[in-house]
Image (cartoon, grey):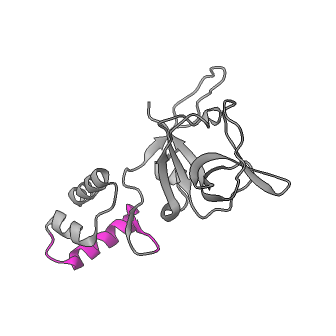
Amino acid sequence: MNNYKDKIIKFYKNTKRMPSYAEIMNMLGFKSKNSVYKLVNKLILEGMLDKDSSGRLVPKKLFGEVPLLGLVEAGFPTAAEEELVDTMSIDEYLIERKEATYMLEVKGDSMIDAGIQEGDLVIVERGIEPKIGNIVIAEVDGGWTMKYYRKTDGKVWLEPANKKYGPIYPEQDLKVAAIVKGVVRKY
């Protein structure tokens, strides 16, 4: 079973998408789609895979869980003991609705004071009504940007998190596509 999982994970890492039933059948050397169906159901029960609203496979916990050992002081050093508090997958921590979530790579420095740097990945979720202060992915007058969502006197505008840039007031149209839920940075 682990060999099957490894092949599915490898396919996902290489293609950035889940394989179809036919691709799983060929990849694993199965003779029928019924065998694939049974395997997929086992992987869904294990929590490795799920299906989106249209029935397509989506990864759930492909990369396993990481131990959560406790807290680390970011201020003055304090005595600490390593204690296993729980385990958690990164997906579980960052993603609430997998079918509505995607990632974008950040270009530019307009959100640097919010801790979002060029090259970071932002995890965003569609289908949420924006609230004042949310960081949003928005289409403004035909162009796309990531900024703080603001509203003054009933008028919506966007605010960068870098003093080098001014606020954006839409001339014609502003559509919020998604809300930023998290930032991933690799060192």
- Left or right, residue 146 beside residue 13: right
Which residue does the image show at 43% across and 44% down from the upper left? 66
What span is colored magenta in the figure? 30-53
Quadrant of image for the N terminus: bottom left
- Left or right, residue 90 beside residue 35: right
Residue situated in front as seen by the camera: 161 or 182: 161
Quadrant of image for the C terminus: top left
Q: Position of residue 149 (x, y in %)?
A: 70, 50
Residue 5 quadrant? bottom left
Which residue does the image show at 58% across and 27% down from the upper left? 80
Direction top: furthest residue: 76
141 over 35 or under it: above or below = above
Q: Is residue 147 magenta?
A: no
Which residue does the image show at 53% across and 55% down from the upper left? 95
Which residue does the image show at 67% across and 34% down from the upper left? 165
Q: Position of residue 164 (x, y in %)?
A: 66, 30
Q: Is residue 84 visible?
A: no
Q: Position of residue 52 (x, y in %)?
A: 44, 70
112 over 40 or under it: above or below = above
Q: Position of residue 23 (x, y in %)?
A: 22, 67
Q: How many marks?
A: 0
Q: Is residue 120 visible?
A: yes
- Left or right, residue 75 beside residue 100: right
